[in-house]
Amino acid sequence: MSVRSVCRDVELFLRGLARELPGVFPRPARRPPAGPRRAGLRRPSPEELAPARELINARAAHWAAALGLRYNRVSVKAQRTLWGSCSRRGNLNFNWRLAGAPPEALDYVVIHELCHLREMNHSRRFWAHVEAACPDYRQRRRWLRLNGASLMAGGPGAANG
Ligand SMILES: [Zn+2]
């Protein structure tokens, strides 16, 4: 048996084992197709970023006031895999692509990150805050799950809808 065929044998054995014991072997992360992923890396032009910033800043200010929360700063960036984040210093980050999402989806991400100012985790208490501000947040989150990759890539379906 050559080294290569032994390796192949081991590989097949492990693959079979992984199928039998899915809990033991972590599943490889599914990667989005190369095309949209590369497109998603595209840096927004200043002309695209400015209105996205304006919109997202306005929604953050609106919801912060509505929820009685205070943040430090909002940044709008071209993250590859993230819709938003909230730092312990109260800085909020949002993906510029959210500006192309339906307003309900954008608002959900804004509310989600703002609620992290209260709870820096995804505990039940955190989700209770989200739900109080946004009772149909599950639907909005589902929209992002279903359409997020396409929105991130700026492909068809990325427009409001
Ligand atoms: Zn979160």
Image: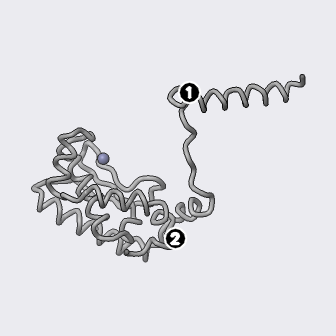
SS at circle 2 = loop
Using the image, tell me which numbered label, if any, was put on residue 91.
Answer: none
Residue 115 image position (x, y, % from top left): 20, 50
The residue that mark 1 highlights is: 21
Which quarter of the rendered picture does the C terminus lie within?
A: bottom left
Q: Which is closer to the viewer, label 2 or label 1?
A: 1
- Looking at the image, the residue that sits furthest to the right is 1
Left-right relation of 99 to 36 = left
Left-right relation of 104 to 15 = left
The residue that mark 2 highlights is: 155
Classify 83 as above or below 100: above
Quadrant for residue 69, please give it.
bottom left
Q: In the rendered structure, which amino acid carries the disc numbered 2?
A: Gly
- Looking at the image, the residue that sits furthest to the top is 1
Residue 76 image position (x, y, % from top left): 36, 61
Q: Nearer the viewer, residue 154 or 16?
A: 16
Q: How is the image coloured?
A: one colour
Residue 26 image position (x, y, % from top left): 53, 33
Left-right relation of 76 to 113 = right
Of marks 2 and 1, which one's residue comes earlier in the chain?
Answer: 1
Query: How would you rate the neighbour count of disc 2 (Cα within 10 Å): few for under 14, some for 14-19, many for 20 or more?
Result: few
Residue 59 image position (x, y, % from top left): 23, 67
SS at circle 1 = loop
Q: In the rendered structure, which amino acid carries the disc numbered 1?
A: Leu
Q: Residue at x 12, y 61 (%)?
A: 65
Which quarter of the rendered picture does the N terminus lie within?
A: top right
Classify 161 as above or below 75: below
Q: Is mark 2 within 8 Å of ligand 1?
A: no
Q: Residue at x 33, y 57 (%)?
A: 141
